[in-house]
Amino acid sequence: MNSQSESSAHSSEYVPAALEVKNLTFCWDSQHPPLAFPDLSLPRGEHLFLHGPSGTGKSTFLSLLAGMLPPATGTIRLLGTDIHQLGAGKRDRFRADHIGVIFQQFNLVPYLTALANVTLPCRLSQRRKAATGETPTLAAHELLTALAIPESHWQRKVTRLSIGQQQRIAAARALIGAPEIILADEPTSALDSDNRDRFIDLLLTMAEERNTSVLFVSHDRSLARHFHHQLELGQVPA
C-alpha cells in the first residue's frame, strides 16, 4: 500500500494514487495534544480498513481527508491534488465531484424521498451527473435494485424506512456517479453481524465494479478480512 512500482519507458501514463498522506497532524486547540496520523498511499480501486480505539481520531482523519478540516501540518493528495491548497469553493467542488461519503449517522435529507436522496450528488456535481451515462434517476434505480430496496419504497421519505434501508440509501448516494473515492465512517455500527457483513460485501463489490477506492473506518477490527489493506491508528496520547 505504501510503495509505488517504477514504470518503464513503455508503460502507460502514470496514474496518481487515489489517496496519499504525508506527515499529517491536527490539533483542535492548545489545550489538547496534537493528533499525528500515519503516512499512507492507497492505489486506485483498492480498499483500506482503518481501525483504532476511541479517541485516536478516526472520524477526524476522515474529515481531514474530505477537506472538511484543515491540517496543522502535512499534505493530503487525492487523485494527485493537494486539496488543502485549493480555495474553499474549489475544495467543495472537488469533494462533490470525486468523493462519496457514508456518514455514521447517514446524514440523509429527512424531507426527501429515498430516490431523491440518492440522486442528490448529481444535482451538486455535473461530473457525477455526466458519469451516470444515462440519467441520474435511471442510475439510482439500478443502485437501489442492486441494494435490495423495494421499488415500492423509492418514493417514500427516508424517515419511513428501516435503519438498514437508510444505510443502503446512504451507500447508493455515495456510489452514484462513480466517484473515485468513498470515505465510510462506522456505517455498520447499528447493524447485527449478518446484516453488517452483507452490507460490506455489497458496498465493496459495487465499488470494485466502478474501480472506486474505499477507506472504511470502524473500531471493530474483525471487519478487516473484507479489505485489501488495514491500518491501525495510534493509541490515545497519555
Image: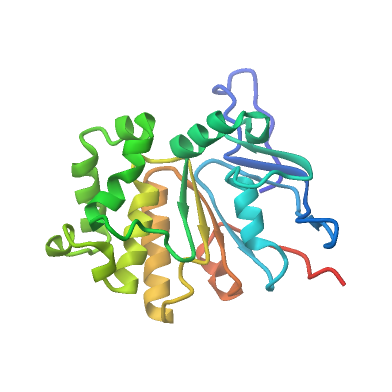
Q: Is residue 47 above or below residue 137?
A: below
Residue 131 location, x and y as percent? Answer: 33, 33
Front-most of residues 142 and 227: 142
* Point 38% across, 30% down: residue: 127
Q: Residue furthest top?
A: 9
Picture coordinates of residue 42, whole percent (x, y): 61, 45
Residue 163 seen from this side: yes
Q: Please, which residue is most extreme toward the right here?
A: 238
- Judge left or right: residue 236 versus residue 120: right
Residue 225 location, quadrant: bottom right
Q: Quadrant of the C terminus?
A: bottom right
Give how far across and how far down residue 58 sits, in percent: 65, 62
Q: Which residue: 65% across, 23% down?
A: 8
Numbered-mark total: 0
Q: Which quarter of the figure has residue 197?
A: bottom left
Relative image position of residue 23 (x, y in whole percent) = 80, 45
**Towards the viewer: 195 or 163:** 163
Horizontal placement of 22 versus 229: left or right?
right
- Going 37% across and 70% down the picture, which residue do you hit? 198
Q: How is the image coloured?
A: rainbow
At 67% across and 41% down in the image, what residue appears? 20
The residue nearer to you, when weighing 34 against 131, is: 34
- Residue 230 visible in the displayed image: no
Height in image: 38 above or below 95? Answer: below
